[in-house]
């Protein structure tokens, strides 16, 4: 049982006991009064009563009144005491109730404060949780952004590396192609020089061949003219010679003949040489068509 309830029960028991005590005293006083009256009016004791001194009766009355007053005083004092005790009890109970109420209010206030504090702590914790969640999301977003930036940077670096690789490959390819072109140019130049040298050698050989054939061709013409020449009578041909100019058509057909610069002979010798040239028509054909020339020049030396 709580202390407050035990205190209330004890106070109620004391109050009831005091009331019972007062009531008992009142009953006892009432019962005693008739006996005294009866004793006084009892006929049997009338004579005796008359003998009793009036002063003693008065004294008894005063004693009774005093006792009564004393009882009444005690009753009043008891009632006053009970009232005071009751008031003190009520005061104590009120104080106790006040204390209990104050305690209850304090507890309620404390509970309310604790509740507010708990709510504040909860709110603070929720705010901290929200802040932590926000920071976590921000960190995740920052991490995601950093990863995206890193990925972009890696892709950019990869693209740049690919570009540089392609540029390097292109540069190397260009160097290779340039080297190939340089080598090809050198080779072409060398081949051109070689071809030129070969062509030059071929032309020289050809020229030598043509010169040889030309000499053979002129020799053939001179030989034919020599075979057709007839020495003039009495002519000394030891130191005789003439320069012969012949104009011919294709096929060796002679169109004109001129004999000039004759030495060691006279006009007869010159005419004999011209006649021998005309008798040689058509002239021998060259071994190579390239040697054909409409205008021929050779020296005629009698054999």
Image (cartoon, rainbow, N blue to C red):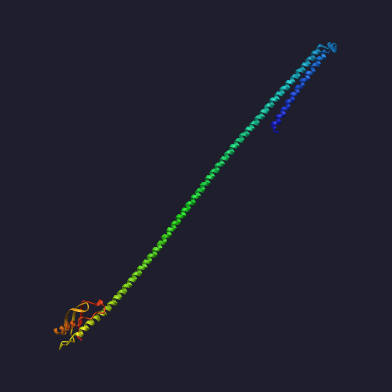
Residue beneath the point at 77% across and 20% down: 27
The foreground one among 251 and 270 is: 251
Q: Vertical placement of 51 versus 18: above or below? A: above
Quadrant in the picture for residue 215: bottom left
Q: Where residue 171 sits in the image (x, y, percent)?
A: 40, 62
Residue at x 75% of width, y 22% of height: 23
Residue 98, image quadrant = top right
Is the residue 235 above or below the residue 246 in the image?
A: below
Q: Quadrant of the C terminus?
A: bottom left
Residue 68 seen in the figure? yes
- Where residue 207 appears, as percent x and y from the top left, is 27, 77
Q: Identify whether 180 is placed above or below 46.
A: below
Residue at image x 38%, y 65%? 177
| The N terminus: image quadrant | top right
Task: Note whether 235 is above or below 245 in the view shown.
Answer: below
Question: Residue placed at 64% from the left, 33% from the top?
Answer: 104
């Amino acid at each position: 049982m709580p202390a407050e309830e035990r205190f209330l029960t004890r106070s109620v028991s004391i109050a009831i006991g005091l009331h019972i005590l007062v009531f008992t005293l009142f009953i006892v006083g009432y019962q005693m009064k008739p006996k005294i009256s009866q004793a006084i009016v009892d006929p049997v004791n009338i004579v005796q009563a008359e003998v009793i001194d009036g002063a003693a009766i008065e004294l008894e009355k005063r004693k009774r009144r005093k006792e009564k007053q004393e009882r009444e005083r005690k009753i009043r004092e008891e009632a006053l005491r009970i009232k005071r005790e009751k008031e003190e009890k009520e005061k104590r109970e009120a104080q106790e109730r006040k204390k209990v109420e104050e305690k209850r209010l304090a507890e309620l206030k404390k509970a309310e404060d604790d509740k507010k504090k708990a709510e504040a702590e909860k709110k603070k914790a929720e705010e901290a949780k929200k802040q932590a969640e926000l920071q976590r999301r921000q960190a995740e977003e920052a991490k995601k952004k950093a990863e995206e930036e890193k990925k972009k940077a890696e892709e950019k670096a990869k693209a740049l590396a690919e570009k540089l690789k392609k540029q390097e490959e292109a540069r190397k390819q260009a160097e290779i192609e340039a080297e190939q072109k340089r080598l090809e140019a050198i080779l072409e130049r060398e081949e051109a020089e070689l071809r030129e040298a070969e062509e030059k050698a071929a032309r020289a050989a050809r020229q030598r061949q043509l010169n040889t054939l030309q000499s053979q061709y002129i020799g053939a013409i001179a030989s034919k003219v020599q075979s057709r020449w007839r020495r003039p009578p009495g002519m000394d041909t030891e130191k005789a010679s003439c320069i012969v100019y012949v104009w011919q058509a294709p096929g060796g057909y002679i169109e004109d003949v001129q004999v000039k610069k004759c030495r060691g002979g006279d006009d007869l010798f010159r005419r004999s040489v011209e006649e021998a040239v005309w008798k040689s028509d058509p002239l021998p054909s060259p071994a190579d068509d390239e040697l054909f020339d409409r205008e021929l020049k050779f020296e005629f030396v009698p054999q």
